[in-house]
Image: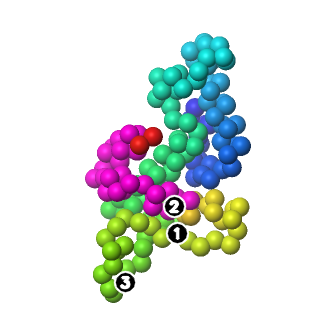
Amino acid sequence: MPRLHYSNATLASLPEYQHRRLQSVLNAAAILIYRKSRCQHITPLLRELHWFRSRERVDFKLAVFIFRCLTVFMVWRRATYPMTYVASPTPTRRRLRSSSSALLTVRPTRLVTMGDRAFPVDGSRLWNSLPHEVTSASGTSKMRLHLVRLG
């Protein structure tokens, strides 16, 4: 399982047919673990194993990594290289409603196929689509709990 979702930043914004391929591998693994037939429903098995679907797992991992970039790496000043990929909103002289929110700036891209799948673009879009209770969580464990409840 760890190798299936290795380097989730590269799996972000995959086309749907590739997520279906990953999901079929997950389904086959669940069937193998429980020794069930392929004709049975897979959703109860995945729930019992506490596994997300392929797209949900990639989004979960990406959201946790963005959260860590914004909180842990920023506070402790460790590993500042992830912060170069996450663009926070630039401060302005005027007080705007968006300045108090935790929204990230989505960088413009030239290529829809490759540019929109890049980690800074897709990660920022995913972060901006999350509810306020997730983005304003006080710690990584609380943020993960909110994400699990959403999924």
Q: Position of residue 70 (x, y in %)?
A: 39, 61
Mark 2, Cα crowd under 10 Å, few <14 / some 14-19 / many 20+, is some
Q: Residue at x 55, y 63 (%)?
A: 120
Above or below 55: residue 104: below
Quarter of the figure with the N terminus = top right
Gap between marks 2 and 3 measured at Cα: 21 Å
User: Which kind of residue does numbered mark 2 sit on?
Assistant: Arg
Q: Amino acid at mark 3?
A: Thr
Which label's residue is closer to the chain start, 3 or 1?
A: 3
Q: Secondary structure at mark 2?
A: helix
Q: Which residue lies under the disc numbered 2?
A: 125
Cβ–Cβ under 8 Å for marks 1 and 2 = yes
Give the residue pinned by disc 1: 106
Is the Cβ of the residue at disc 3 closer than 8 Å to that at disc 1? no
Residue 147 is at least partly visible in this image: yes
Query: Dot 1, crowdedness within 10 Å: few (<14), some or many (≥20)?
Result: many
In the rendered image, residue 94, in percent from the top left (x then y), is placed at 32, 85
* Quarter-of-image position of residue 151: top left
Query: What range is drawn magenta here?
Result: 122-149
Q: Is residue 92 left or right of residue 44?
A: left
Picture coordinates of residue 110, whole percent (x, y): 68, 72
Which residue in the structure is indicated by mark 3?
A: 92
Identity, as a three-letter code, of the amino acid under mark 1:
Val
Q: Earlier in the sequence, mark 2 or mark 3?
A: 3
As for residue 129 lying within the magenta part, the answer is yes
